[in-house]
Image: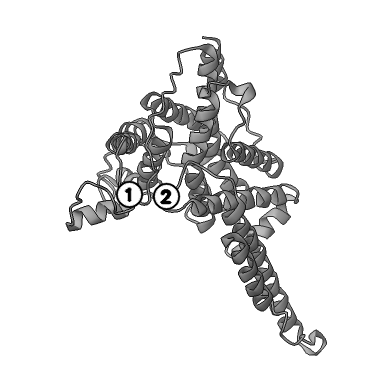
């Protein structure tokens, strides 16, 4: 079969790339610096080969998903990448804190330096007439911050995944409350009121959610003839060709998710679990970079976000099928991708707890404790 042929081809390629036919290097005649360079190069090549071998296995034998475009193997590879991410997190979890930071420094030499935390709420004035650069310096700096565009794009992707306006707005408001809850530990969460509730919620989140839901409504139920043998004559214009090309990268079907969080106490808890998991994902991004000393614009943060974004739609679909199955949750197996996202979120929390020891000793503010006590009781 094709998978067996691919196995033998890749096995032969691995033999060649591993240097099995190259003459052995006499390390005793080399300088210490050259030895270290060769060992480091071999270590990197070994890591790449291990990852490539596992991703090949994932592409050929990984679990199937409902995503079939542009090709099912792509989503199987995404599952494999997320498994590798989980294993890497477990490896970091088993290290001492300084060693875990050294591992990240091995991956990227510019890491390993403690981060200066930026507080956004030190000056909440919108109009600053005395500033020589701009009379709206605080507003300008906030709008042109690296998180501003990320807010819009992030909520667009979340709308594509959750596809429910009520859950999205509950998620949006609760995250702002999470920022207020943990701002005594993370200075990044110390924002001005207009930054949190006007720019973030009412502007960025609204735009992302609105356009995300517009995309879902536009694509819902649309059918495409990919074989070129359909009975209906297709237009041959440039716009039609572009639409067909872009549609290759979309799900085969855009089903509406009827979460119905108020239909029963059990369904409410099931929907609440989705929101909690999303909040954990968001909070982990800030806590991990603070604990492991990873700057916000660093490529490792972008890789993590890309992995989570790639898994979000598949995992959400599997979880929705799991809780809405006619057979019931007790007789239905949770999908592999949904299970994997929960596992990764839990290990990320463990890393924050272990490697953040001694970093979060500030006492909880009284108003935070009172608010959440009233919120949970009522």
Most foreground residue, 153 or 131 = 153
Image spot of residue 265 (x, y percent): 53, 12
Judging by the rendered image, the residue that carries numbered circle 1 is: 247
Sequence order check: which comes first, mark 1 or mark 2? 2
- Say if residue 200 shows up in the picture: yes
Image spot of residue 113 (x, y percent): 61, 58
Image spot of residue 244 (x, y percent): 28, 52
Residue drawn at x 66%, y 34% is 361
> Crowding near pointer 1: few (<14 within 10 Å), some, many (20+)?
some
Kindly check if marks 1 and 2 are in contact, taking CB atoms under 8 A apart as contact.
Answer: yes
Q: Which mark is residue 200?
A: none
Q: Is residue 236 above or below residue 360?
A: below
Q: Secondary structure at mark 2?
A: loop
Q: Is residue 117 above or below residue 260?
A: below
Most foreground residue, 7 or 141 = 7
Q: Secondary structure at mark 1?
A: helix
Image spot of residue 295 (x, y percent): 52, 54
Q: Is residue 240 left or right of residue 26?
A: left
Q: Which mark is residue 69?
A: 2
- Say if residue 183 shows up in the picture: no
Residue drawn at x 45%, y 53% is 71
């Amino acid at each position: 079969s094709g998978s067996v042929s691919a196995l033998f081809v890749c096995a032969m390629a691995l033999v060649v790339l591993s240097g099995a036919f190259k003459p052995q290097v006499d390390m005793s005649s080399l300088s210490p610096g050259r030895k270290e360079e060769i060992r480091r190069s071999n270590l990197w090549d070994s890591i790449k080969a291990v990852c490539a071998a596992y991703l090949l296995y994932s592409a050929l034998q990984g679990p199937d998903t409902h995503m079939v475009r542009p090709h099912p193997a792509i989503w199987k590879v995404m599952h494999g990448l997320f498994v590798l991410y989980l294993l890497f997190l477990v490896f970091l979890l088993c290290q001492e804190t300084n060693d875990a930071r050294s591992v990240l420094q091995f991956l990227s030499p510019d890491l390993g330096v403690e981060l200066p935390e930026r507080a956004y709420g030190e000056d909440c004035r919108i109009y600053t007439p005395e500033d020589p650069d701009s009379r709206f310096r605080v507003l300008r700096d906030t709008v042109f911050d690296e998180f501003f565009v990320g807010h819009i794009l992030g909520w667009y992707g979340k709308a594509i995944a959750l596809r429910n306006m009520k859950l999205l707005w509950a998620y949006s408001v609760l995250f702002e409350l999470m920022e207020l809850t943990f701002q005594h530990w993370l200075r990044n969460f110390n924002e001005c009121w207009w930054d949190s509730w006007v720019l973030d919620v009412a502007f960025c989140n609204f735009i992302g959610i609105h356009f995300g839901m517009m995309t879902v409504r536009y694509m819902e139920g649309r059918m495409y003839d990919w074989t070129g043998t359909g009975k209906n004559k297709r237009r041959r214009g440039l716009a039609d060709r572009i639409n067909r090309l872009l549609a290759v990268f979309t799900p085969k079907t855009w089903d509406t998710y009827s979460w119905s969080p108020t239909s029963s106490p059990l369904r409410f808890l099931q929907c609440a679990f989705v929101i909690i998991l999303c909040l954990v994902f968001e909070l982990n991004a800030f806590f991990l970079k603070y604990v492991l000393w990873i700057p916000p614009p660093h490529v490792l943060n972008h890789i993590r976000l890309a992995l989570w974004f790639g898994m979000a739609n598949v995992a959400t679909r599997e979880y929705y099928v799991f809780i809405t199955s006619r057979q019931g949750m007790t007789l239905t197996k949770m999908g592999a991708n949904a299970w994997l996202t929960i596992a990764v979120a839990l290990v990320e929390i463990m890393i924050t707890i272990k490697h953040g020891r001694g970093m979060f000793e500030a006492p909880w503010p009284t108003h935070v404790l009172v608010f959440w006590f009233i919120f949970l009781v009522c």
